[in-house]
Amino acid sequence: MSFSFEIIKKSDEAKLARAGIIHTPHGDIKTPAFITVGTKATVKSLTPEQVRDYVGAEAVLANTYHLYLQPGDEIVAKHGGFAKMMNWVHKTNNEERITKNVSPMPTFSDSGGFQVFSLGQALGHGVSKIATSEEISKRESESNAREETHEKLAKIDDDGVTFKSVIDGSTHRFTPEISMNIQHNLGADIFFAFDECTSPLAPIAYQREAIARTHAWAKRSLDEHKRLGVSKATGEMQALFGVVQGGAYEELRKESATVLGAMDFDGYGIGGSFTKEDMGTAVKWVNEILPEGKPRHLLGIGEPMDILMGIENGIDTFDCVAPTRIARNGAIYTKDGRINITNAIYKNDMSSMSDDESWYTHQFTKSYLNHLFKADEMLAATLASIHNLKFLTTLCEEAREAIIAGNFLEFKEEFIKRYYKNYTKSN
């Protein structure tokens, strides 16, 4: 089956919000959807079966940069792609499992562009994809007040990027063509054009340079993808998404959406950096321009309110490492907000981790999870990660149901008022 996207229902209240289905050669993804991140072809502390059965994930996303460095994309290709390598497959009976007659589930891979950002321009600033205006102002002042002392591990030019491995310091080179070849070896159903992700601190002059490079790289990525044809790993055609950039600048975001929207991509990623206050607005600028009939993915965003704002403004899929990263430190999502399960108040808390009896983590108490973290047991990270991924997966599923039912804005308001106790007004 080839790649396609269908819109099942447009919101009656928020004109950009929609419920849909992404059809891939390896199965369907009902949207809006949260895509679980398996950076190195593994979701930290979880088995693929736990991600599939306990989280309910319909797709996972792997990282091009990391799999290129270790074990190497050629080795991934020998497995038939990273889905087969990590056994990310549909449920099978025992005979199918033994004979390895398995059907992979849907997958994404990123382009490596964000690693360029984190190793290059952002190194030493301590900034991420989203920063508040106050943080940006403070860090701009700090940056201007001191001489840069960090050695950049990535250097960008118009042809590509040269970077040093975080594993052994060896030097490597990514160009759009190299990224496409690597991602063809990884064999994801959906992958992304090579792009330059910029820092929220970057001035508009640099943002202009960066989107010019991103647009040129997008064309080169598309040309190389078409030249390569089917994936070397899977023997099937992959879907390539262009990546819209432009930071928090309206004119640049709209320009990027216009330029990339005119290219023959299968869908679009919205990448780069945002100010926290304007994230929803920036997404709206882009999605009012991008082709309506193609899916849109918001790269690296996982805060519950940001997900709801994204859905309201036309985003179909999301990915983020946050739910598992914070889980390993004891942070747990609940409908009443995020809690730190290692706090003393949970030592004797006999309430369930989840109010929903259908969730795997419902059978465990907060007291038990507190004990696991205090005892430094590995199961702590496993249960916390299952729970947090289930929370965001369910949030997207419930948003989808609300769009179909025609009450998305009511659902959004009720969730926000309960989750964010001090929040009084919808964005």
Image (cartoon, rainbow, N blue to C red):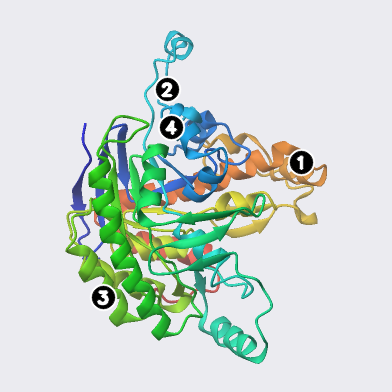
Q: Could you give the CA–CA distance between mark 3 and mark 1, rounded to whole angstroms?
A: 48 Å
- Viewer-side label of 4, 3: 4
Residue 73 visible in this rendered orientation of the protein? yes
Q: Could you give the CA–CA distance between mark 2 and mark 1, rounded to whole angstroms?
A: 30 Å
Q: Disc 4 or 3, which lies upstream in sequence?
A: 4
Q: Disc 2 or 4, which lies upstream in sequence?
A: 4
Pointer 4 and pointer 3: residues touching (CB < 8 Å)? Answer: no
Q: Secondary structure at mark 2?
A: loop
Badge 2, how many Cα within 10 Å: few under 14, some, many 20+? some
Residue occupying the point 52% across, 31% down: 48
User: On the image, numbered disc 3 is attached to which residue?
Assistant: 254
Q: Disc 2 or 1, which lies upstream in sequence?
A: 2
Q: Residue furthest right?
A: 375
Q: Amino acid at mark 4?
A: Ala
Q: Could you give the CA–CA distance between mark 4 and mark 1, rounded to whole angstroms?
A: 38 Å
Q: Amino acid at mark 2?
A: Lys
The mark found on residue 77 in the picture is 4
Q: Determine whether, in the image, residue 386 is placed left or right of residue 203.
A: right
Q: Secondary structure at mark 3?
A: helix
Q: Determine whether, in the image, residue 145 is placed left or right of residue 271.
A: right
Q: Amino acid at mark 3?
A: Lys
Q: Secondary structure at mark 1?
A: helix
User: On the image, numbered disc 2 is attached to which residue?
Assistant: 91
Badge 3, how many Cα within 10 Å: few under 14, some, many 20+? many
- Viewer-side label of 4, 1: 4
